[in-house]
Amino acid sequence: MLTGMTVERFTEALAAATPTPGGGSASAQAGAMAASLLRMMCDLTLGREQYRAHHESVQTIRGRAEGLRKDLLALVDRDAEAYDAVVRALRLPRTTGAEKDQREAALGRANLFAIESPMAIADACAALMTMAGELAHKGNVSAVSDVGAAALLAYAGLRGAVLSVRANLKGVRDEADAARIRDRVLRLEVDSEKLREGALTAVCVRTNGR
């Protein structure tokens, strides 16, 4: 499993001349690191008297960030498995009509799997960016720069995952389904720009003491 590797081994696996792990797994890992930083910020905020007014909301964010951290770690492996499934489907025999039909069905299922995984990564990263924006206002000012790093990591994870979705859309035979996915991806892209800038602006304001 990729998630059981050391950082060094994981980066070596990414660098290897093999299709997986690739951008999707790296995007999930970026999101998991963002979630970890947000949980750290929550733990550095909870129990401090000056942030007592935000205790309940920060506690809620902590639970959500930890849940997403675990989800994204699972997606590091799942995204690689999804792409491997596409490769296996492409290698199926297609000599007879029956083989062609079976291959087409397998490829359709694999392509949907290859889209679902990065979409889940993108959705999780969008949620983390929203949390980063809130924590930038409410969290411990001493660690607010880490929230900025989390927002950027989540943004990178989201955009990287979206690239994977777009790359696999060509395998979606139903144009209505493809159009729906494109619209969803576009909304994520537009929203992510606003969330990133909102979080970074709040970080800069608190860092500069204004």
Image (cartoon, rainbow, N blue to C red):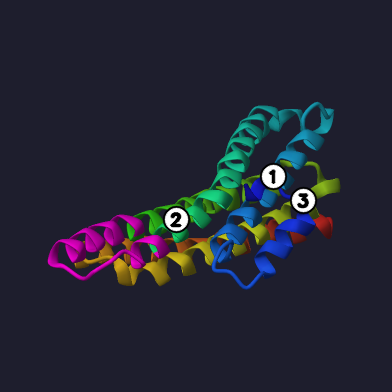
Q: Residue at x 71, y 30 (%)?
A: 53
**Residue 141 in view in this figure:** yes
Query: Along the horizontal axis of the image, is 14 left or right of 8?
Result: left
**146, 200: nearer the viewer:** 146
Does 126 appear in magenta?
no
The quarter of the displayed image where residue 85 is located: bottom left
Q: Is residue 149 left or right of residue 108?
A: right
Q: Are marks 1 and 2 in contact (CB under 8 Å)?
A: no
Magenta extent: 87-110
Viewer-proximal residue among 123 and 79: 79
Which residue position holds label 1? 4
Residue 82: assigned label: 2
Is residue 130 visible in this depiction of the protein? Answer: no
Q: Which mark is residue 6?
A: 3
Horizontal side, residue 87 vs residue 34: left or right = left
Is residue 92 one of those drawn in magenta? yes
Horizontal and vertical percent position of residue 52:
75, 28
Between discs 1 and 2, the one toward the N terminus = 1
Q: Is residue 172 above or below residue 28?
A: below
